[in-house]
Amino acid sequence: RYFEKLYAIHYNARGWYDRTLWCLFRALYGLIYLSYIYKTHWLLHHWQDSLSSANIFGVMWFFSAVILRVAILEWHYPLMQRLQTFLNDHSYQRKRPEVVAKRAQFYRRTNRLVLAVMAINFVEIVCFTATNVMKLEDFMLQFRGATAGGWPVQVVYGVLTMFWGGTYCMGFMVCYLLMAIFQLEIDILVQSLEDVGHSLRAAHESDIFWDNIIDRLRPHMYRLEDLSINLQHLKEVIGPIACVQYYSTYLVIADCCFIVVSHGLSSYSIVYFISMMVFLTESFFLCHMVEHLRNLKPRVASALYDFDWMLQMQSSRQHLASQYRHIRRTFLLITAQSDQNIHFSFAGIGEISMNSFAQLLEKSYSMLTFLLQFAK
């Protein structure tokens, strides 16, 4: 919540005073965006060299992607709060020490990850302000094509510009944390089912082997149903975010490759290289996390199949026959649904998967190769 507020993503303002301060804080970032709209307008009417055009158009598209991502998060924030409420309910397997330890370890690791992202943003802000802002007029505050203000104004303008750019990473972190916690809860569910299977195999006796299996599986099946329902809601958030992420990456990589190929690696082009790597890393994590989430039902079906229920369910007592048929029917229904993966798409355009990321890398490499030949 604190990082979301800091990066002007979301804040539940209480009272007119807090709401006014929040609007002014957001307006500060809005002024940065308006300044680049003005630069783009001036550039279109007073065309300059290709490097200047690539710089301004690249930043303009990047900021537009930031605004789209923040707008998507704000639009779906009530839904995201419901998902957070569901994920914060740790009543499932709360009494198992290993599950409590696993959740605690996950949150410690997550805190370190968020702090690492913040540290990278800080380093990039320093590098951008010390090189690009102070050396290239394209990144300075301008009026009618001329620099406005002295170096203190430009430093403040550069810091705010990169801070606004860092909102893109923090917006992704919000979605990444949601997906990561869902993955954690799925792993806990699958591990719990595997533990049930181990205990059943260890206590193998033909008549009492499946005596209380329904009672033991009931809380896990309820958890499976809750996870499936909430993952369907998560798709509503991830789809538009992934669409912006995927196609923004193409354009940003094209812009960065053009600048790096045309002018080589230097003190200011290294920032573009870092930005390109950030976009590719986000795309990888997005596709990688979705791969784990979409396989929820197949993983559960595989854990149930490992119970060896087809071989073990042989009742020698007549009064257990109906119970065994009921259990067999339940297992068959769950197994039959195992091929029904939860499909995540780029807002209805294509499916999110590691194949999508491989295609992104392939097309990016082709783009870089073309630009290298064009530069020659």
Image (spheres, rainbow, N blue to C red):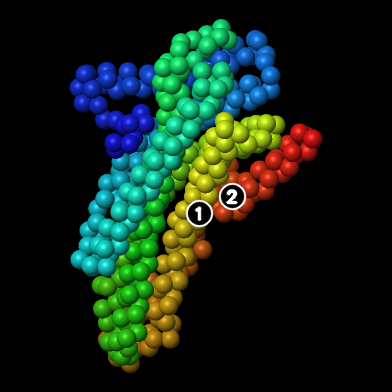
Q: Which one is in front, 298 or 138?
A: 138
The image quadrant that residue 323 belongs to is bottom left
Indicate the amino acid at tag 1.
His
Q: Position of residue 28 (x, y in %)?
A: 38, 19
Q: Which one is in front, 50 or 245?
A: 50
* Mark 1 crowd level (few <14, some 14–19, many ≥20, 10 Å Cα): some
Give me the residue at 65% from left, 31% from top.
259
Q: Is residue 223 above or below residue 211?
A: above
Q: Is residue 152 left or right of residue 208?
A: right
Q: Which residue is mark 2?
A: 357
State the residue lying farthest toward the bottom.
Answer: 316
| Mark 2 or mark 1: whose residue is earlier in sequence | 1
Q: Position of residue 13 (x, y in %)?
A: 25, 26
Give me the residue at 30% from left, 81% from top.
199
Disc 2, SS: helix
Q: CA distance from mark 2 to mark 1?
A: 9 Å
- For residue 233, say whether it is visible: no
Q: Which one is in front, 210 or 347?
A: 347
Instruction: Tell me whether the residue at label 2 lies in contact with that at label 1, contact meaning CB atoms closer than 8 angstroms.
Output: yes
What label sits on residue 288 in the rendered view? Answer: 1
Instruction: Locate the N terminus by quadrant.
Output: top left
Indicate the amino acid at tag 2.
Phe
Disc 1, SS: helix
Give me the residue at 69% from left, 35% from top.
261
* Mark 2 crowd level (few <14, some 14–19, many ≥20, 10 Å Cα): some
Q: Position of residue 32 (x, y in %)?
A: 45, 19
What label sits on residue 196 in the rendered view? Answer: none
Q: Position of residue 14 (x, y in %)?
A: 21, 26
